Image (tube, helix red, strand yellow):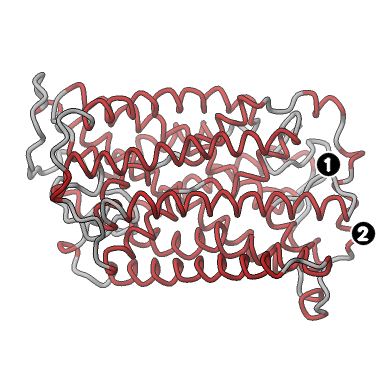
């Protein structure tokens, strides 16, 4: 018997393929009515603390380590203010998404809807006949963007863990007990980075076999503990002996600000998890409090780490803050703890694409083969992220391109448009309409700027970029600061 999925499907309900959404509204609604959710499942939902743990882990990923460089690209004054504004805007779009999903579920008498369903039902109930006819494409687009975004994150996580593992193993003989500032080193790897990727592959496959979020919250707690430990060591170092920041520019050039904008949008990774987490809560009405609390903590962490890191290292700020840490055992442990945290975060980010693709596959096989098909798809998807990391030498820039397009669309462009579609027939105020249009335009600009920068870096020679790639690993401690969309090897 399959466990309850992240997208809120009941374990006894038959999975629906995306093609089924092109049927009538009443037919597509019948599979998720309240009678399909047994009381026992509601009683075993996620608690507030478990939901908060998942929310924190979904938003604290690899992008966090590149925030000091992002502040350098924006300026000491403009950077923190802009990051705070983008964070507030992202949370507001999450709230918009929650409100639209709740309104549509009430209107259609459904227990819950996920992101793709919300977009589809919003289009299906709007006044425009053409949009109603093609409403199923709303779900197709959102599902495609979610799959690309989340699998992209997973591919980055694969290389991030492998890079850290390689450096910890091959720098072990050079690490000292005294914590002096790190020196730039040029090392020839003993083992190819692909070896380390293949080493962690079976462990990640076993991890994604865990399909129950309540069980997964145990590992998520461990990830939070290790991430918290690494953050504590980073903060412990950067708050000591901060130089006079008066020499740092308050505002950087517009060209580098574009880099900051892309980094900031990429850093907020959890938009795809908002509705699934709410749907899995024991008391979904409490999710708003959890969201505001969790995202407030995350924004404070982002602003503090980015600002203090830039003030500490100034013009020498590297693409990942761990590159600036002393080369000693104490701070080498930051790599280990953060890698453990990213390892468990992989499973959370993996859930979204898995729960979109797996029901389509299971619907094509008999019930006796359902479990085998489920595990096979999970294994194939993990292998796909591994193969992507191995075969694409400049993976970070490719993921920057995909992430700039899909992350901006999911976080800033689609939610305001969905609110316009959902509530416009109910006499929205002019202020709300103007606000939604402005947010969507801002998201579109971020998408264009991020795409431009990623494409620019892709056409540059490898030795002029900070590519987190198997090619650049031969000199893997020599980096420039030309692109902070994703962190370089640490």
Q: Which is in the foreground here, disc 2 or disc 1?
A: 2
What is the C-alpha distance between the residues marked 2 and 1? 17 Å
Q: Position of residue 408 (x, y in %)?
A: 50, 61
Residue at left offset 79%, top offset 62%? 121
Residue at left offset 76%, top offset 66%? 428
Q: Position of residue 185 (x, y in %)?
A: 7, 42
Q: Position of residue 193 (x, y in %)?
A: 25, 44
Sequence order check: which comes first, mark 2 or mark 1? 1
- Closer-to-camera residue (277/187): 277
Quarter of the image for residue 436 reads bottom right
Residue 26 numbered mark, or none: 2
Q: Position of residue 329 (x, y in %)?
A: 18, 22
- Closer-to-camera residue (350/71): 71
In-image side of 176 versus 133 (left or right)? left
In-image side of 51 versus 112 (left or right)? left
In-image side of 482 versus 202 (left or right)? left
């Amino acid at each position: 018997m399959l466990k309850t999925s992240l997208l809120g499907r009941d374990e006894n309900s038959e999975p629906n393929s995306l093609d089924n959404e092109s049927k009538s509204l009443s037919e597509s609604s019948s599979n998720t009515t309240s009678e399909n959710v047994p009381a026992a499942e509601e009683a075993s939902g996620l608690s507030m603390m478990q939901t908060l743990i998942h929310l924190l882990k979904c938003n604290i990923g690899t992008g966090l380590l590149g925030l000091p460089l992002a502040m350098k690209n924006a300026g000491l004054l403009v950077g923190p203010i802009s990051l705070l504004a983008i964070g507030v805007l992202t949370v507001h779009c999450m709230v918009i998404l929650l409100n639209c999903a709740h309104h549509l579920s009430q209107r259609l008498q459904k227990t819950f809807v996920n992101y793709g369903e919300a977009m589809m039902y919003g289009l299906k109930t709007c006044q425009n006949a053409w949009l109603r006819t093609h409403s199923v494409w709303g779900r197709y687009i959102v599902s495609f963007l979610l799959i690309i975004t989340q699998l992209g994150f997973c591919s980055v996580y694969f290389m991030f863990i492998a890079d850290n593992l390689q450096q910890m193993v091959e720098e072990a003989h050079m690490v000292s007990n005294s914590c002096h500032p790190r020196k730039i080193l040029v090392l020839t790897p003993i083992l190819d980075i692909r070896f380390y990727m293949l080493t962690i592959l079976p462990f990640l496959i076993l991890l994604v076999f865990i399909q129950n979020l309540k069980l997964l919250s145990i590992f998520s707690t461990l990830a939070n503990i290790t991430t918290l430990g690494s953050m504590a060591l980073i903060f412990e170092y950067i708050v000591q002996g901060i130089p006079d920041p008066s020499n740092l520019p308050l505002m950087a050039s517009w060209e580098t600000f574009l880099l900051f904008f892309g980094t900031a949008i990429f850093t907020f990774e959890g938009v795809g998890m908002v509705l699934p987490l709410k749907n899995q809560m024991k008391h979904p009405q409490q999710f708003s409090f959890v969201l505001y609390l969790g995202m407030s903590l995350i924004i404070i962490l982002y602003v503090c780490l980015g600002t203090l890191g830039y003030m500490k290292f100034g013009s020498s700020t590297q693409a990942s803050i761990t590159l600036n840490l002393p080369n000693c055992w104490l701070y080498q442990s930051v790599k280990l703890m953060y890698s453990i945290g990213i390892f468990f975060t992989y499973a959370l980010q993996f859930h979204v694409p898995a729960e979109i693709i797996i029901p389509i596959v299971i619907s094509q096989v008999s019930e006796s083969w359902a479990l085998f098909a489920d595990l096979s798809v999970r294994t194939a998807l993990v292998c796909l992220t591994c193969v992507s990391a191995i075969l694409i030498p400049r993976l970070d820039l490719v993921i920057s391109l995909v992430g700039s397009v899909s992350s901006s669309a999911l976080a800033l462009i689609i939610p305001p448009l969905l609110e316009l579609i959902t509530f416009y027939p109910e006499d929205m105020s002019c202020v709300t309409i103007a606000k939604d249009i402005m947010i969507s335009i801002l998201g579109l600009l971020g998408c264009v700027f991020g795409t431009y920068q990623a494409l620019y870096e892709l056409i540059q020679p490898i030795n002029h970029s900070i590519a987190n790639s198997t090619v650049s690993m031969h000199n893997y401690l020599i980096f420039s600061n030309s692109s902070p969309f994703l962190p370089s090897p640490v």
